[in-house]
Image (tube, grey):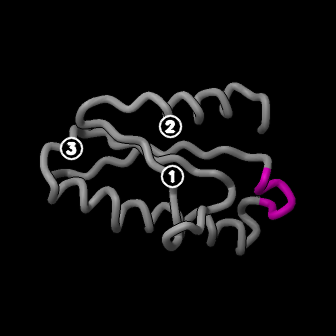
Amino acid sequence: RGGSTAESAFVNALTNNKDGFTSLLAVVTPNLLAKPNTILFNKVTIKDARQAVQMFGPAQYGVAKAVVDSVAEGVIPEDEADDLFISVGVFIHW
């Protein structure tokens, strides 16, 4: 929720990227963010372009789609979607 520890962690993750570890927003399509606001971060170091494409492509879309579907199916209440923050650690075995 806004002003919460979760919001602070969300902003911190988005603004403090390190070499090989990147945080990105979940998007359904370019410029269409998932709601609730969702951030992904990789659990394993990204070492090359092939790995980056996996994270910035299917992983990013898959998480965004799961979040949007959860709202559509009522798992996440629609009236709370603008107030929540979701953080997802993505593990892709390279």
The correct choice, above or below, for 24 with respect to 77 in the image is: above
Q: Distance between the residues labelled 3 and 2?
A: 16 Å
User: Residue drawn 15% across and 59% down?
Assistant: 50
* Magenta residue span: 77-82
The image quarter in which residue 81 lies: bottom right
Residue type, label 2: Leu
Residue 25's tag is 1
User: Residue drawn 25% across and 31% down?
Assistant: 19
Q: Label 2 belongs to which residue?
A: 14
Q: Distance between the residues labelled 3 and 1?
A: 17 Å
- Helix, strand or loop for disc 3: loop
Q: Earlier in the sequence, mark 2 or mark 1?
A: 2
Q: Label 3 belongs to which residue?
A: 46
Q: Are marks 2 and 1 in contact (CB under 8 Å)?
A: yes
Is residue 70 found left or right of 40 in the rendered image?
right
Q: Where is residue 3 in the image (x, y as percent from the top left)?
A: 78, 29
User: Residue drawn 71% across and 63% down?
Assistant: 75
Residue type, label 3: Ile
The correct choice, above or below, for 43 with respect to 8 in the image is: below
- Helix, strand or loop for disc 2: helix
Mark 2 closeness class: few <14, some 14–19, many ≥20 residues within 10 Å: some
